Amino acid sequence: MTFELTAVVPSRGFDVTLDVDEGSTLALLGPNGAGKSTALGLAAGTLRPHDGEITLDGTRLAHARAGRTEAWVAPHRRRVALLAQDPLLFPHLSIRDNISFGPRAQGRPRREAAAAAARWLDAMDLVHLADRRPGALSGGQGQRVAIARALAAAPRLLLLDEPLAALDVDVTPALRQTLRRLLVGQTTIIATHEVLDALLLADEVAVVDDGRVVERGPTAEVLSRPRSAFAASIAGLNLVSGTWTGDGVVTASGGVVHGYASHPEVPVGAAMTAVFRPAAVALHLTDPHGSPRNTFRGTVRSVEPRGDLLRVRTDQLAADVTPQAVAELSLVPGRAVVGTVKAAEVDVYPV
């Protein structure tokens, strides 16, 4: 492994183990306050663990036991670059000098640093802005400069903390595609709550919730077959957990969800998860005649736009329905509804 972290920070309720393979990108997904930024701070050296060990390329960056630091490498000596939402560019330096700052700070000759800056100015399509100051840039341009500055220092580990969150929606797609190209072969950890960042940039995903990693695996697998409620929510899926009866998943409330079990050999009583798309849910005001086997009764909590459809959230699930259906059924908050899902639309698998 290129990077390994096992750290406990009791004051933040943080207890996490992570690793990242050479040249791969790991996305940390989780809600605000879950511990994503804490993990990046530990890796960058802006935060010390109470207990644990952090290594990069076999070099111990930090080691602590019971609050006592036994080994520590200063942030500027780690060959780790941290890029946050705010580019934090040096306002008194030109864009060219901002980018060459990293190599110069590492002690590289002026000519070598200038060559690195020129290379990244070209790679990030910033040549025409090289002599400007940061105050003359747009948000998207500033973030491009920040990325170029980070990569010009040739970090062994690149840390991205919600790098696209503060940008206008019209510039985000282009910058995301730029990152997709530049991160190939670069060992990276990206903290985000945006599913597109994970899908387009990450090889693997670790779902962080309440200071713990609750799910980890290849990006496509985690987002198509989530095992945690947060992963299901960001993937836009409904998730119901319970135990296997041999014919369905029985929930804590006693309801049973039937679906396609990809692991038919699972023993009765095993923990199982049922997942289905909001588009597979039909909403009714009363039990429909000849209804599917899966029925969910609840109350409408919210209605929000979702492309050409409207997403209706109840206290049990989400359903994507047409505006016409919302109007005809008067699906407003507080309305009691019955959601139905065909068993063929439900995927059931072990937790």
Image (tube, grey):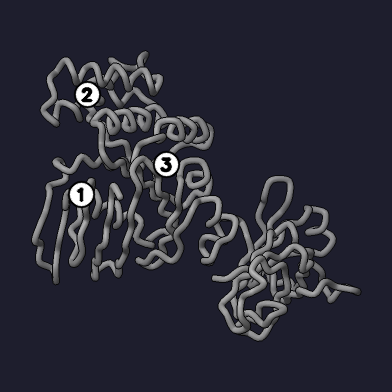
At a point 50% along the width and 51% down the height, the residue shown is 219
Of the residues tagged 3 and 2, which is closer to the observer? Answer: 2
- Residue 222 lies, in percent from the top left, at 53, 57
CB under 8 Å between callouts 3 and 1?
no
What's the CA distance linking mark 3 and mark 2?
25 Å
Label 1 belongs to which residue? 58
Q: Which mark is on residue 100?
A: 2
Q: Which residue is mark 3?
A: 166
Residue 31 % position (x, y):
44, 59
Between discs 3 and 1, the one toward the N terminus: 1
Residue 335, above or below 100 = below
Q: CA distance from mark 3 to mark 1?
A: 35 Å
**The C terminus - image quarter:** bottom right
Left or right of 162 on screen, residue 156: left
Drawn side of residue 330 relative to residue 104, left or right: right
Q: Is residue 18 above or below residue 254?
A: above
Residue type of the residue flagged with mark 1: Gly
Say what amino acid the circle numbered 2 marks.
Answer: Ser
Name the element at disc 3. loop
Residue 266 image offset from top left, x and y in percent: 61, 75
In what element is the residue under mark 1?
loop
Q: Nearer the viewer, residue 71 or 57?
A: 57
Mark 2 neighbour class, 10 Å CA radius: few under 14, some 14 to 19, many 20 or more: many
Q: Position of residue 174 (x, y in %)?
A: 50, 30
For residue 142, which quarter of the picture? top left
**Of the residues shown, which amino acid type is indicated by label 3?**
Ala
Residue 160 seen from this side: no
Task: Give the mark, 3 or 2, whose residue is nearer the N terminus.
Answer: 2
At 58% from the left edge and 71% from the top edge, which residue is drawn?
350
Total residue callouts: 3
Q: Closer to the observer: label 3 or label 1?
A: 1
Residue 13 relative to residue 269: left or right: left
